[in-house]
Amino acid sequence: MVRIFGKFIKPEEYDVFEFANGLYDIVFTHRQLMQDDFESIKPYLKPTTKIVTDISIESGNIGSFLEKYNIITKNEPYDFYLISDTILSEHKEFKNNKFKLLESYHISFYAYLNELSDHNIISDKQIFAETHNGFMSLNNSCRLHRVYLFTQFLKRNLSLDKTSFLFTTGGNDGFKYNREVFINFIDELKNKKLINDELYDKTINFNLPKVIDLDSNNYFQSDNRITDLYKDTILNLVTENLSGMTPGDIYTPYIITFTEKTIKPFIAKQIPLFFALPGLLNILRKLGFDLFDDLINNSYDMEFDSTKRLDLILDELEKLLKMDLIQYKKDNKERFDKNYNLLEKFNKSGEELVKTFLYNEIIK
């Protein structure tokens, strides 16, 4: 609720689900509730109730949600409103007169950058990359493509000084390193012949979790913070939540999503490489971001084979590590500034989109 509506609706103006009582004119829901437990809200609905679902920052693996959402909106009598931080309307499968849609990549920036969001990217001070001392790559949740990335770092003997590989899964107490899931992914990579026996042994015997950006304790609580680590290196290899390596990452028709991980390098005025869904760079370029195509061969963005794409990315990383990127940044300061300034522009435009949709479509 507070993620995108916190600026417009005060806490005293609504009831949270745990304290719901009676019938409501408007119900705000998140993705999981609509996807997995729609029946639980029915006791609070009138025939004229408006149901607003916000899937901003939750649009990864979107296929399962959209299939369920289409069924619900076609068969239930209520008025439905969907807010998405990716583009759905161009796909004929999702043309449905039963719900009104607000869609824009700008909403993703607003969801992460507005100060009232529960996923706000925190920075106590302006932190900009100042040195070219290796590269950083932060990896939290245990996903197949992140485990594969780790094996390829080891294979190429790349420095892990400014990297983290927590390989966590979530629970009630927070995120915890999950050795069992990690082993399952390593076994999968070996069975698919993506790594050989030597690399398998090297990976499985590495002392994990590899921690740098969070306190090393039993559970990891991440607060989505920009730390001084971002100042220590201009190079950031971002691993998005989805890469196309796992079944379900790529949905037909093709939908591209991204998270705060894509936004952070632009906040810190870094040079980013993205291990993400193919086509993400094309989206960012259309939004106006400078991806330093004169410096980086970003054609990896067009490679749909995730293992080949990562090879191309790591080739670029190794090339960049040998270059004077601080001088490059000094010579191109206005380009880094432009990327940084776009963030606030999209934060404001995303806010305006949500505000207009709320007052013109939902509350009227």
Image (cartoon, rainbow, N blue to C red):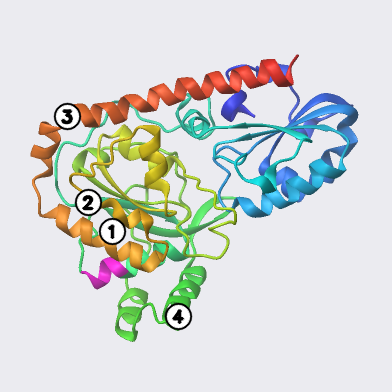
| Contact, mark 1 vs mark 2 (Cβ under 8 Å) | no
Measured from the top left, where is residue 185 in percent x and y? Answer: 47, 72
Instruction: Identify the element where label 2 is drawn.
Output: strand
Q: Please give the range of residues in magenta.
A: 152-156
Identify the residue at horizontal 23%, vertical 41% (top origin). Answer: 292
In three-dimensional space, the C-alpha distance between marks 4 and 1, rounded to whole angstroms, equals 21 Å
- State the residue in front, 295 or 314: 295
Q: Which mark is residue 313?
A: 1
Q: Residues within 10 Å of mark 2 (few under 14, many from 20)?
A: many
Instruction: Identify the element where label 4 is drawn.
Output: loop
- Locate residue 322: give its quadrant: bottom left
| Contact, mark 4 vs mark 2 (Cβ under 8 Å) | no
In three-dimensional space, the C-alpha distance between marks 4 and 3, rounded to whole angstroms, equals 44 Å
Identify the residue at horizontal 16%, vertical 52% (top origin). Answer: 320
Left or right position of 47 against 199: right
In three-dimensional space, the C-alpha distance between marks 2 and 3, rounded to whole angstroms, equals 20 Å
Q: Which residue in the structure is indicated by mark 4?
A: 192
Q: Which residue in the structure is indicated by mark 3?
A: 333
- State the residue in front, 325 or 8: 325
Q: Residues within 10 Å of mark 4 (few under 14, many from 20)?
A: few
Q: Is residue 153 magenta?
A: yes
Identify the residue at horizontal 88%, vertical 36% (top origin). Answer: 77
In three-dimensional space, the C-alpha distance between marks 4 and 2, rounded to whole angstroms, equals 29 Å
Query: Disc 2 or disc 3, which is closer to the eye?
Result: 3
Q: Quadrant of the N terminus?
A: top right
- Indicate which disc, 2 or 3, sits on the residue closer to the N terminus: 2
Measured from the top left, where is residue 93 in percent x and y? Answer: 68, 48
Measured from the top left, where is residue 210 in percent x and y? Answer: 33, 60
Left or right position of 139 against 168: left
Q: Please tell me whether residue 107 is drawn above or below residue 318 in the rendered image.
A: above
Q: Amino acid at mark 3?
A: Lys
Q: Which residue in the structure is indicated by mark 2?
A: 135
